[in-house]
Amino acid sequence: MRRSWTRKRSLRTRGSSLLVIALALALLLFAGGEVSAAEGENSAAEGETSAGAEASIADAPNFCVECHSNPDFLVTAKKLYDYFQEWDVSVHHQEDVSCEDCHGGNSEVRDKKRAHGTEVSGGLTVGSAVSFENIPSTCGGCHGDIYEGFRQSNHFAHLRKKKQEKQGPNCVTCHGSINATVLNVNTVQEACQRCHNEETGNHPELPAKASELLDRFLSIHRYYRYIGIRGDPVDTSLLRSH
């Protein structure tokens, strides 16, 4: 009997121990589940907050666009209407560059006077961000490297001339303003010829040189791109011939 009772107590003790372990594991799993659920809820909440913040930024009102997109401007303010239509199909619009980024002002205010403030003014106004002389620095706010290169050019040296005599071009002279374009080997010569031609006598040889220079640059660019893709050099005699 003693041995049998001892065995039963041992089994009962072992069973109790197993039950305690099982309960402990259950508690741990339950607690872990609550933690995981809480973490999941927190992550979801953070995701919703982040998505909400992004959505609020994307959905923020732009009263410049709302006002200037008015179709009535086709009759009442044709120039403003044309400006908006040009911007609407431009690369600037695609890149989320809006009116206030170049002209200043506050796009989050509906009232015209408060939205325009003292910053927004026409291109003929001295000190305006879009005046002829200030356009390069305004464009340079985004196109910094290009602006620094332009500052070292003869065009920039002739940008500020009294009475506009032999005045150099700014960015929009060659690239356009709102719906700007990047000149390529097929268009650069025509753009340069607007000023540099036989009639003006202003270095008429430059358009052809500009086209040749851009073509050489593209040849070098294609060469290095080829090496980057293939990983082996190619015959450089073609490059030297340029």
Image (cartoon, grey):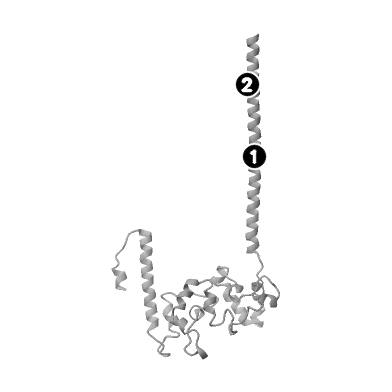
Q: Is residue 230 left or right of residue 21?
A: left
User: Does the rendering let one see residue 35?
Assistant: yes
Work out which quarter of the rendered image holds the C terminus and state it: bottom left
| Residue that carries the numbered disc 2 in the rendered image | 14
In the rendering, at what x and y percent does residue 2 appear?
65, 9
Q: CA distance from mark 1 to mark 2?
A: 28 Å
**Residue located 65% across and 16% down the image:** 9
User: Which disc is residue 33 wearing?
Assistant: 1
Element type where label 1 sits in the image: helix
Give the residue type that dot 2 points to: Arg
**The quadrant where residue 232 appears:** bottom left
**Residue located 30% across and 67% down the image:** 236
In the rendering, at what x and y percent does residue 88 appear?
58, 72
Of the pair 119 and 193, the residue shown nearer to us? 119
* Outermost residue to the top: 1
Of the pair 173 and 181, the residue shown nearer to us? 173
In the rendering, at what x and y percent does residue 169 appear?
48, 83
Of the pair 13 and 217, the residue shown nearer to us? 13
- Asked if labels 2 and 1 touch by Cβ distance under 8 angstroms, the answer is no
Element type where label 2 sits in the image: helix
Vertical relation: 166 (above or below) 212 = below
Work out which quarter of the rendered image holds the N terminus and state it: top right
